[in-house]
Image: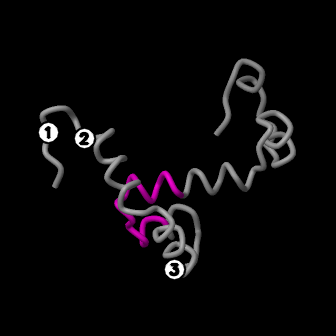
């Protein structure tokens, strides 16, 4: 979701063209980044990735395989409260 001063008062749809032109990225690259971040946040929970992004199990497994263990470990380190334990 993209909300800023210019879009806060409108209800028009954000299209892939707007994302491409405004952000300078392809919309698909933004989606892939969000999926990989969700894989790290869920410790590679394929079911949650499928449900959240509407992916097939095979596609979710490919994303989970892409996010190697060091990525998942780094994400846990950044998101675990200081002094907290990692289950």
Q: Are marks 2 and 1 in contact (CB under 8 Å)?
A: yes
Give yes or no for contact between labels 1 and 3 (Cβ–Cβ under 8 Å): no
Residues marked 3 and 2 touching at CB (< 8 Å):
no
Helix, strand or loop under label 1: loop
Residue 74: x percent and y percent? 35, 47
Disc 2, SS: loop
In this picture, residue 67 sits left or right of residue 72: right
Chief SS of the magenta region:
helix
SS class of the residue under badge 3?
helix
Residue at 77% x, 21% y: name it: 6
The tag on residue 57 is 3
Q: Nearer the viewer, residue 45 or 62?
A: 62
Q: Which label belongs to residue 84?
A: 1
Residue 69: x and y in percent read 36, 61
Direction from residue 54 to residue 25 in the image, left or right: right
Give residue 25's quadrant in the image: top right
Residue 82 vertical placement versus 54 (above, below): above
Nearest the eye: 62 or 12? 62
Q: Give the range drawn in magenta.
A: 36-49
Q: In the orientation shown, which residue stands out farthest toward the bottom?
A: 58
Q: How far apart are marks 2 and 1 (CA)?
A: 6 Å
Residue at image position (75%, 23%) is 9
Q: Residue 80 carries which label?
A: 2
Crowd class of label 3 (few under 14; some 14 to 19; many from 20; radius 10 Å): some
Residue 58 against residue 18 in the figure, above or below: below
Disc assigned to residue 61? none
51, 24: nearer the viewer: 24
């Amino acid at each position: 979701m993209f909300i800023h001063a210019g879009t806060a008062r409108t209800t028009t749809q954000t299209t892939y063209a707007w994302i491409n032109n405004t952000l300078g990225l392809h919309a698909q690259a933004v989606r892939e980044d969000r999926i990989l971040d969700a894989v790290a946040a869920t410790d590679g929970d394929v079911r949650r990735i499928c449900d959240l992004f509407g992916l097939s199990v095979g596609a979710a497994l490919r994303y989970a395989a892409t996010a190697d263990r060091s990525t998942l470990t780094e994400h846990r380190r950044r998101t675990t409260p200081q002094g907290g334990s990692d289950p």
